[in-house]
Amino acid sequence: MRRATLAVCAALALLPSCAVHGLAFDNDHRVKFVSPRNRSTVRLPVALRWEAPRLARTPDGGPFFAVFVDQSPIKPGQTLAAVGDENCKRTPGCPDLTYLQDQYVFVTRDTHLTLADVPKSRGQRTGARDAHEATIVLVDARGGRIGENAYTVQFTIKGGH
Amino acid sequence: MAKTVPVDSVEDLELSEDRLRERARRIIGVTGDQEGMSRLREGIAESGVGWYPLIALGALVVVDQFQFFGFSILGPEISRALGISKSLLALLVLLKTLAVVLASLPIAALVQHRPRRALVAKLTGLAWGLATVASGFVANAWGLLGVLLFDGASSGSVDTLHGPLLMDTYPAHIRLRVLSGYRAALAAGTVAAPLIVGLITGVFDMSWRAVFVITGVICLAAVVVASRLRDPGFGRWDTERVRAEVRRDAGAEDRGDSGEIDLGFFEVVRRVMLIPTIRRLAAGWAAIGVMLFPFYTFLFFFLDERWGMGPGARSLFFAFAWACALPALAVFGRRGEAMFREDPARLMRFVSLLAALIVVGLFVGVTAPVFPLMVAAFTLVLVVAAILQPAIGMVAMSVVPPKMRPHTSALLSIFLAGVGGVGGVLLLSGIDRRFGIGGAVVSLCGPILVAAWIFYRTAPLVSVDLDRMIDEVVEREELRILQTSGVHLPMLACRHIDFSYGQLQVLFDVNFTVDEGEMVALLGTNGAGKSTLLRVISGLGLPTKGSVHFQGAEITYLDAERRLALGVNQIPGGRATFGPLSVVDNLRVYGHSLGRRSRDVATGIDATFDAFPRLAERRNQLASTLSGGEQQMLALGKSLILSPRILLIDELSLGLAPIIVGELLEMVRRINATGTAIVLVEQSVNIALTLVDHAYFMEKGEMRFDGPAVELLERPDLLRSVFLEGATKGMGR
């Protein structure tokens, strides 16, 4: 009886961690990378291009594209403020676009972006590829992530950086 | 009136055991030749349950792969959708693996007393099916942690229960083929899972959430398929048949309840790990785990970096390799069965050869200049790894009693994934950075060579442990027949006891019996093994071979406290008291050890003080401040409180004045007069023989004399050593 109660309590505790609304069960193709080709080898600077013809624009010009390089994007519903560290969170106006760029997070309304540099790979194996990844999520005007869809391209930098 | 079995009847049991052992080996599938192997179809028909249990368990193990592959393949998508890092996701998946490992033994505990393995397998299947569906609805990392732990804990039943269920469902002569078929189902699941994931995401263009919901529903469908699965009971095709053979041989009938004392969970685990074959297999399996778990990771990177294979190509590679495992398992099932049938050691030697083949595969795979050779080499590695599982499982489960098979399977999976897997990840995690991914793969050859060597060394042990298991079953059944036919058995019977302290064996094939209310002396020189034999009887030490029966029930592997509750009580040699406690507290502790009511304990304490007035005078004095004689009196007080059925007294008179010894011996006589049997271990032959009619004499770990005390006095060849030792001591040498 105690075990059953414990199991029910554990299940109830986990309920808030599950959801039924706002979940994406279909793949979303509103944004599609044009270049570079997925898993292709490129040289720096890397020109990222994507298209989003079916993306419905909002009156404030959104949604915006937030490009995260070599890192996981913010959680759905979270704002870009989550990218900032403790110092940034205590500073008014932070994070701004410059701060975000320093963290390899780029926010743009355009469908292209040039990466002059990419984060240095840590713990690289001998002979391993210098692999990188750019992930786009949609954010609203206040920087909040819209939905859980994400669009990714992986590429390898040739000749190091 | 009950007949009393003379001590000679032990010999009678031995004769019938030798005769029955050969027949029992045939029953459990070891015939000594490769002739007359029946077809798998015939064996399946003989089982009376057809293919259904194999299909049902196969379906469960196939769907068990879905969640794992879902997270492996769709990890990046999950990470991006939920906004959690890949390292956090990897940690969550690792926690799931730990949950699988940690849940396996508790699941074994769930089924050890009652044969409800099928029920638990179905319920856990239902649990992981629901967990897989729930994975499609998680909204954050906590949700993921919950479903992964839930899934892991329920998946622990696969390794723990499926193998033992199949062992009890199908006849012994087709088991390895059945286990290989089951392993083939696992391989099929490994092929199917990525294909299903690819189908849902690629063809139907659905997200990772849909993958989990759909595969979860497939899991639940598999549970429905398995819903008619029933537990066949423990040992239906082996130990039960051996018991029936023993009864047939004795012309006895099955009288139902065996009156056996069931071992507790930890007692079973300890008992399983005492079996030399299991210990070796666990060590070898751990070495395989050291290789296997990093191997998959290294291979992914190697295929990516050396051969530029993307996720799709890598999935195809693994699907191809596991598909190749299907015919290989079919061939091995029959071939391995024949080897086991002829001699289990042969199968173990073949397993060690297979392990060595992995080394060849790894080396060729890394150095292969052409793609097909690389694919062939690594396919060989994966196929051999698949074959090892049923082979090791078959050997391990054959040398343990059926009730302990779930524990054995769980322990082996803990050694493979928990000890080996975690150890491998820790040991080899930095090696790829130093030597590159190719070097990392080659570095795996070390542990696999160790495993091959361990398996080779295990080969000679298998038959010995198989016979030991058979002997235990035969002996238990024969004793049961004697009991049920009204024959009175000795209250305590130790048979063929071997005992070792680590590598040092100190008891050799010792037989020892004590009858109800009897007082016997166990004599011998210093270091002869007398105290060790008492430890084996009281449960402070466990034998490596042989059995201890008390009042007809086997207690060989029972915990000391459970033996105490049965009435086996030992007063260890030296000062058997708690020095920092007062006299009265010592006596209370004895009572507390059995959870006796305070009134009974108080009565026992009063009885002790009546018997030893000197203790009453010192009731509040610390035990450490008592004289040697008083401490022995206090130790004897234990028996007055606990009223044991048998009291084992080790070196009662050592270093005490004759007048004190006289007092103590008088008390021993009085305890014996109440019906408590006494085993008196003494170096002083004179003291012992004034008390007892029956004596045993031990020398160098062997029982050299068993008979009337007066006859021992006529054996100067034995007693000389004791007297000489005493004389030497007296001369201060």
Image (tube, rainbow, N blue to C red):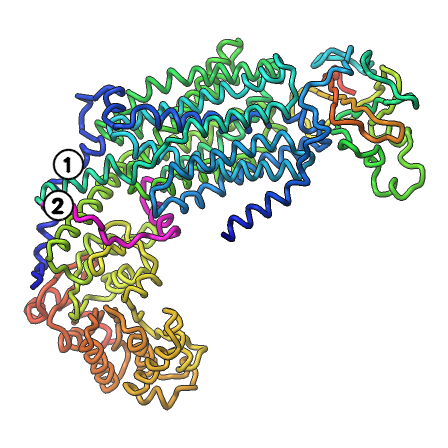
Which labelled disc corresponds to residue B337?
none
Give the residue at x 62% y 17%: B201
Specify the quadrant of the image occupied by residue B682.
bottom left
Q: Is residue B424 left or right of residue B204?
A: left
Front label number (2 vs 1): 2
The N terminus of chain B appears in which quarter of the rendering?
Answer: bottom left
Span colored in magenta: B252-278
Which labelled disc corresponds to residue B253?
2
Give the residue at x 10% y 46%: B252
Q: Are marks 2 and 1 on the same chain?
A: yes
Q: Looking at the image, is B339 positioned above or below residue B419?
A: above
Number of marks in picture: 2
The chain ID associated with circle 2 is B
User: Between disc 2 and disc 1, whose residue precedes?
Assistant: 1
Q: Is residue A72 left or right of residue B226?
A: right
Q: Secondary structure at mark 2?
A: loop
Residue B224 versus residue A61: which sits nearer the camera?
B224
Q: CA distance from mark 2 to mark 1?
A: 22 Å
Specify the quadrant of the image occupied by residue A90.
top right
Residue B157 versus residue A58: which sits nearer the camera?
A58
User: Per the image, is B267 magenta?
Assistant: yes
User: Alpha-carbon neighbours of circle 1 within 10 Å: few (<14), some, or many (≥20)?
Assistant: some
The C terminus of chain B appears in which quarter of the rendering?
Answer: bottom left
Q: Secondary structure at mark 1?
A: helix
Label 1 is placed on what type of residue?
A: Glu
**Which residue in the protein does label 1 denote?**
B22
Evaluate whether residue B356 shows in this view. Answer: no
